[in-house]
Amino acid sequence: MRICFFGDSFTQGVGDDRGLGWCGRLTPRMRGRHPDLTAYALGIRRDTSAEILARWESEARARLPHGHPHRLAFCFGTNDCADDGTGRGRVSPAETLRNATAILAGAAAMAPVILVGPPPALDDPAVDRRIAALEPGLGAVAKEAGIPFLSVFGTLRQAPAWTAGAAAGDGTHPAGAGYALLADLIGDWPAFRHWADIA
């Protein structure tokens, strides 16, 4: 099995001293069922949904050869809501939802897909308000596409394992304990276990 995890700095695991992030913590859970699993954490710091839309397909096709089972996972939206210097998000909510619709439609034609909702920014309450407002729309887009969606914003925003690491670091990215919590939230999600073929 080959898996591509697309997203931003959270997908890349920025802030984790072990460099695992949530993707690197989920991969070992799948290796018992898929010992030849290859997983690619394709997060780029500050990427918005627009930038992920522009790159995901070519990056996936370069890594997913014919004749193997494939999976695609996405996590984006926090950077869309980040301040663009004028007090607005970098990407409007309407554009984010259009981007999400295009990403999920294309991805679903290639492989089974899951979408993880955007984590909180924490260091800017206005950004978190925009994320909270955006998240239900992302869930609705995923539902319309028949793709599982996991909301994580509310849980992570209140979880000491996430917030303490962010506070000790750059204010936004957690330490290893926060990524371990996110990996547990995703790993215990029945839709993930079905998607990963480890149910």
Image (cartoon, grey):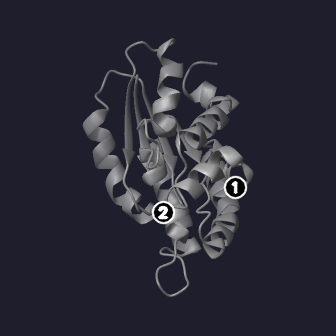
Q: Which of marks 1 and 2 is nearer the N terminus?
A: 2
- Estimate how packed mark 1 is, as few (under 14), some (14 to 19) or many (20 or more) residues with alpha carbons within 10 Å: some
Mark 2 highlights which residue?
99
Which residue shows up at 68% across the image and 71% down it? 129
**Does residue 98 appear in the picture of this structure?**
no
Amino acid on which the number 2 mark rests in the picture? Asn
Q: In the drawing, does residue 187 fall left or right of residue 90? A: right
Residue 59, quarter of the rendered image: top left
The residue lying furthest to the bottom in this view is 86
SS at badge 1:
helix
SS at badge 2:
helix
Q: In the drawing, does residue 115 fall left or right of residue 133? A: left
Front one among 61 and 76: 76
Q: In the drawing, does residue 25 fall left or right of residue 160? A: left
Up/down of 40 relative to 118, above or below? above
Of tags 1 and 2, which is closer to the observer? 1
The CA distance from mark 1 to mark 2 is 25 Å
Mark linked to residue 157: 1
**Percent from the top left, x then y, of residue 121?**
58, 63
- Estimate how packed mark 2 is, as few (under 14), some (14 to 19) or many (20 or more) residues with alpha carbons within 10 Å: many
**Percent from the top left, x then y, of residue 62?**
25, 38
The residue lying furthest to the left in this view is 62
